[in-house]
Image (spheres, grey):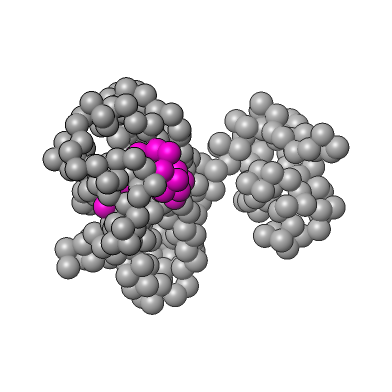
Amino acid sequence: MSTVIPDARLLRIFTCVVRHQGFANAQQELNLSTSAISTYMSQLESLVGVVLCHRGRGGFSLTVKGEEFHREALRLLGEVEGFERYAAGLRGELRGSLKLGVLDATVTDKSLPLSDVIGAFAREHPAVHLHLHVQSPYELQLSVLSNRLDLAIGAFQLRMNGLLYQPLYREQHWLYCSNAHPLFEAQQISQEEISLQRMVGRAYWNQVELVRHGFKRTEATVDNMEGQLILILSGAYIGFLPEHFAQPWVEQGRLRALIPATYGYQAPFSLALRRGRAKDPLVQKFREMLKRQLDA
């Protein structure tokens, strides 16, 4: 019985189409016409012997077997790319692509000099193409696990098997209200009063995490810090924000931290990578540069 392994180009076209959710949307990245993409997709389906996706008036969608094949295609392409980088490293070169993920609202965090790290990395390795993605903690870990990302930086309360975590630093969070909120001008505020306020939580917090921060329920939910800031500034809600992210609004008199002695916590930030990727040349170099910047 013979086994047919599809050409890497077919796999890359397939994963690009899935990423863009359709042939037309993938045209620009692939630099191919929709008819050419359709031909390649038909070749791939003929090779593997199953229908991978539905396309037509009903829109694009993967079949059940297509979803399974997509996961394996991402894994295989990640392994191939890692091997190509390893071979380039043997020649003293660093080229290819580095896919980095990061939690949102980190640009104002002086504890994470990510722009400096990226600048130094790009100057030292100009042949490397960098992809930067901003995602939630869960999405970051899932992307690393499936090889859609090489590295991810974030606060990961719930950790996934198959990933390695390198501790980086701790990010300070406080509970805030805005100048449009009734508590903003209050002189004395009790924990009981705090518990009666409308709280905005994060979609990636479970009930245990919410209780750990002193609350039993939320009246609004967001999946990023900008959304959290908008709802807090509305005056209708209170919520937690990173200190560095809230500071400009505090200085403008728009935000106030509520009972800092009680409502504050530190989020441990880590660098996440897939097991077995630690010796990948690009991953190794980026980790080294990040460590140097943090130590400095």
Compared across the picture, whether 191 is left or right of 218 comes to left
Quarter of the image where one finds residue 85: bottom left
- Taking the spot 20% from the left edge, 36% from the top edge, the residue there is 189
Residue 112 x/y as whole percent: 28, 59
Residue 211 x/y as whole percent: 27, 25
Compared across the picture, whether 63 is left or right of 131 comes to right
Q: Is residue 162 above or below residue 82?
A: above
The answer to if 232 sits in the magenta stretch is yes
Q: Which residue is farthest left?
A: 261
Q: Nearer the viewer, residue 163 or 102?
A: 102
Numbered marks: total:
0
Q: Nearer the viewer, residue 30 or 58?
A: 58
- Taking the spot 81% from the left edge, 53% from the top edge, the residue there is 34
Quarter of the image where one finds residue 115: bottom left
Question: Looking at the rendering, in which quadrant would you find the N terminus?
Answer: top right
For the question of whether residue 273 can be seen, the reply is no
What's drawn in magenta, residue-wise? 225-243
